[in-house]
């Protein structure tokens, strides 16, 4: 069925969300369940024998699941959760890689009426603990090594966490651990559950993102978000059952939940799920050998592929790609052109946020401006605004810079920050959701990213809050004051660097610098730890005593190359702690 769109050009088009609702299958009595929409509906409508997922293990072990097999396995996973006493609305946290268990955990949670909460495996114990606490996770499904290294020691301080289910290396049975069970064994032994009745307003998933305080924000989304995932999959990627789709996002990032898990499945296509991290030869090989037609990745990944040069790309020039897209940070025009030259498909930049739950602004084939975020999708009303206390002024002048606001009627828009009603309310004004991004709109209606209105750092596409890093490092006895800022980086866009002033009795020097880097890495994990520590005598402050981040940013930029201290050897964009 076609999307209910009116208007002739993309700029004029309007999508009727209420009419679009009829694209969903639904369940008797007005019920709506993400698991049903993504998987079981295809089986009920006679498409059960189609391949839904092709998994590639680290050593290229290959496993496929049809929609019928996925429906069965995820209903068993739901029964496992129900047998543990999971109630509608309970949170199931997940620390898994891009493996079949991630799909069972997500879809099993939705079928059981639970809230799926995936976490970054590259976070350290501190950030993981605060997220598990805020989400009040009742169940954790984790790989054995991640559990052992990051959670086992915290277990006693997480009273809400009642059950831990483990997955061994490469899907093997985990060794026995106190208070843990074998996830795959339980799934194999369970009967398929009937889907628990949920509706469009029932909570379905929560993703944490960094905020302007030390506490992360848990953006909650409802089952009704599936309509946005269905619609945007068609609007942006033109997904059909004929497509082979590949999204490279980390499971902890909402891009994975929305566009690796939900969108390709609800649109009935086949997804490739590659467990391995970035490797240029491997990635070109996956694109070519798996005959990927639609690819969704990040600017950092694209720039890393560009670094390996045109000669390598040429070997793989004969591929099946018809569309490639990116998200997470601005995509430079050179990368768009490179995609066209090297892969035969230009990269289309898309814009969205954890809070929006789905793509809101995008470049589309035939309607693209390299370097821009694109046009609002039909069904999305976007404006450039100024917020004055509780009033919104919409800026209509061409190229005026202001905050990007979206009309708060998107099915995928977040419905709460868990445990923080005030913060949630403060994100809305006069029916608009305020994104915190500064943008301008050109004469053709294209949006251009200008920056953030707050101090968030963007590194390899990931949003890092300086405050969480600062709070953690303040726990080190040497640290008197600390300010973390993003320093521009050609590959990663920014890297977090920390300026530190010391308490009496501590001397700046190489030994202390390494100690602090190690401390940060241990506590925060590689995804959040600052890459550099720079000592300052006194912190630059505003007249009201706040750390002057602007001055620190200038200092970070001015730091001469040879004085730059040791940077921890982390492969760019590769966020794992192995
Ligand atoms: C930034 C990502 C420029 C922006 C799904 C946004 C972008 C934040 C783009 C959300 C883009 C995302 N151009 N900036 N195409 N896409 N951003 O929540 O600042 O991890 O607010 O979700 O990334 O990051 P988040």
Image: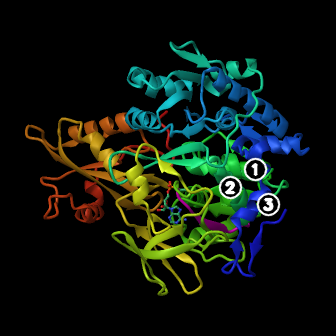
User: Can residue 248 be seen in this snapshot?
Assistant: no
- What residue lies at 30% left-to-right and 59% top-to-bottom? 561
Identify the residue under disc 2. Answer: 229
Answer with left or right where residue 557 lies relative to residue 341. left
Front tag of 3 and 2 = 2
Marks 3/1 in contact by CB < 8 Å: the verdict is no
- What residue lies at 54% left-to-right and 53% top-to-bottom? 414
Quarter of the image where one finds residue 323: bottom right
Is 68 colored magenta in this rendering? Answer: no
Answer with left or right where residue 66 lies relative to residue 264. right
Identify the residue under disc 1. Answer: 266
Way the structure is coloured: rainbow
Quarter of the image where one finds residue 15: bottom right
User: Where 113 falls versus 344 (above or below)?
Assistant: above
Q: Which residues are magenta?
A: 343-353
User: Can residue 483 be seen in this snapshot?
Assistant: yes
Question: From mark 3 to mark 2, how far is it between C-alphas?
Answer: 30 Å
Identify the residue under disc 3. Answer: 318
Q: Nearer the viewer, residue 156 or 198?
A: 198
Marks 2/1 in contact by CB < 8 Å: the verdict is yes
Answer with left or right where residue 92 lies relative to residue 99. left
| Disc on the earlier residue, 2 or 1 | 2
Q: Position of residue 281 (x, y in %)?
A: 66, 49
Find numbered disc 1 in the image and state the secondary structure of the residue it sits on. Answer: helix
């Amino acid at each position: 069925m076609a999307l209910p769109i009116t208007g002739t050009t993309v700029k004029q088009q309007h999508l009727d969300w209420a009419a679009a609702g009829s694209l969903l299958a639904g369940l008797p009595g007005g019920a709506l369940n993400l698991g049903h929409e993504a998987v079981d509906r295809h089986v009920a409508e006679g498409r059960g024998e189609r391949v839904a997922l092709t998994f590639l293990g680290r050593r290229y072990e290959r496993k496929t699941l049809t929609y019928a097999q996925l429906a069965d396995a995820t209903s068993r996973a739901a029964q496992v959760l129900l047998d543990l006493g999971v109630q509608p609305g309970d949170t199931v946290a997940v620390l898994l890689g891009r493996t079949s268990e991630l799909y069972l955990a997500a879809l099993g949670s939705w079928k059981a009426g639970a809230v799926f909460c995936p976490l970054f495996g590259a976070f350290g114990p501190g950030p993981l603990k605060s997220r598990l606490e805020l989400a009040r996770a009742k169940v954790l499904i984790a790989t054995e090594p991640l559990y052992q290294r990051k959670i086992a020691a915290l277990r006693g301080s997480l009273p809400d966490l009642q059950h831990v289910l483990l997955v061994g290396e490469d899907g093997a049975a985990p060794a026995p651990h106190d208070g843990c069970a074998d996830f795959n064994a339980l799934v194999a032994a369970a009967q398929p559950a009937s889907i628990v009745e949920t509706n469009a307003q029932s909570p379905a998933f929560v993703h944490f993102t960094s905020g302007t305080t030390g506490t992360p924000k848990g953006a909650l989304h409802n089952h009704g978000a599936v309509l946005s995932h269905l619609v945007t999959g068609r609007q942006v990627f033109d997904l059909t059952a004929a497509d082979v789709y590949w999204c490279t996002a980390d499971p902890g990032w909402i891009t994975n939940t929305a566009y690796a898990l939900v969108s390709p499945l609800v649109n009935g296509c086949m997804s490739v799920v590659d467990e391995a991290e970035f490797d240029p030869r491997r990635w070109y090989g996956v694109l070519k050998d798996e005959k990927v037609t639609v690819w969704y990745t990040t600017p950092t990944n694209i720039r890393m592929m560009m670094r390996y040069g045109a000669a390598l790309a040429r070997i793989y020039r004969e591929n099946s790609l018809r569309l490639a897209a990116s998200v997470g940070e601005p995509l430079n025009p050179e990368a768009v052109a490179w995609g066209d030259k090297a892969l035969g498909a230009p990269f289309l930049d898309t814009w969205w946020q954890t809070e929006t739950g789905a793509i809101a602004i995008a470049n589309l084939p035939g309607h693209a401006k390299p370097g821009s975020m694109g046009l609002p999708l039909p069904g999305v009303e976007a404006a450039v605004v100024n917020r004055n206390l509780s009033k919104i002024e919409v800026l209509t002048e061409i190229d005026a810079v202001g905050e990007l606001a979206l009309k708060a009627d998107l099915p995928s828009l977040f419905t709460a920050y868990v445990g923080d009603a005030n913060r949630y309310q403060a994100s809305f004004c006069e029916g608009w959701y305020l994104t915190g991004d500064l943008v301008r709109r050109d004469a053709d209606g294209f949006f251009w990213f200008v920056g953030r209105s707050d101090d968030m750092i963007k590194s390899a596409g990931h949003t890092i809050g300086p405050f969480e890093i600062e709070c953690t490092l303040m726990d080190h006895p040497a640290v008197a004051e600390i300010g973390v800022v993003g320093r521009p980086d050609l590959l990663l866009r920014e890297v977090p660097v920390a300026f530190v002033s010391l308490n009496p009795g501590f001397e700046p020097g190489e030994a202390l610098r390494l100690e602090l880097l190690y401390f940060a890495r241990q506590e925060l994990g590689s995804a959040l730890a600052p890459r550099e520590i720079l000592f300052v005598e006194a912190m630059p402050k505003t007249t009201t005593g706040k750390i002057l981040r602007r001055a620190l940013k200038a200092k970070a930029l001015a730091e001469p190359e040879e004085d730059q201290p040791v940077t921890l050897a982390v492969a760019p964009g590769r966020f794992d702690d192995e």
